[in-house]
Amino acid sequence: MSFKSSFSKIIHKMPKRDYGIPGLHVYVDHTAQATIYYVETEQELTFPEHKHAEQFTIVVNGFCELTIDGKSTRYEKGDSYSIPADTLHTIYLSAGYAEIDCVDDPND
């Protein structure tokens, strides 16, 4: 079975960022004010602990579990959430997961 993208072919024309995590696909677009990410997974995975500028996310498909300060919260298709700037967090992504992120940093 081949990977079926949740995003339009238009998204796949954007630059792809390689995080070195098998099954993770990240497409990036920069504006003057922010960085927009289109993220999708082929398989379940956990993105390692990290921090960055403020982030707003909309879950497009599947579910994720965001962990901040040891507390995990599950978000599913149609949910949205925000992560405050400089907050250490990890995130588990289900197989077939997709999200759109806006990070408050045009150079992220």
Image (cartoon, grey):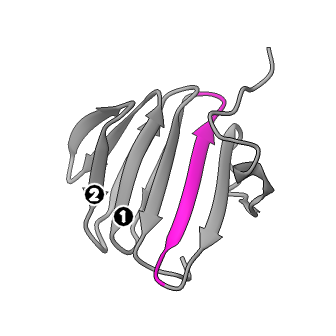
Q: Which mark is residue 82?
A: 2
Residue at the spot 75% in from the left edge and 26% down from the top edge: 3
Q: Position of residue 94 (x, y in %)?
A: 49, 28
Magenta segment includes 32 = no
Ranked by sequence position, the earlier of labels 1 and 2 is 1
Q: Position of residue 79 (x, y in %)?
A: 31, 38
Quarter of the rendering containing residue 5: top right
Name the element at disc 1. strand
Q: Position of residue 99 (x, y in %)?
A: 49, 44
- Magenta residues, as a range? 33-43
Amino acid type, label 2: Ser
Magenta segment includes 40 = yes
Residue under circle 1? 55
Residue at the spot 58% in from the left edge and 47% down from the top edge: 39
Amino acid type, label 1: Gln
Quadrant that contains the N terminus = top right
Q: Is residue 10 left or right of residue 77?
A: right
Q: Assign the magenta stretch its main secondary structure.
A: strand
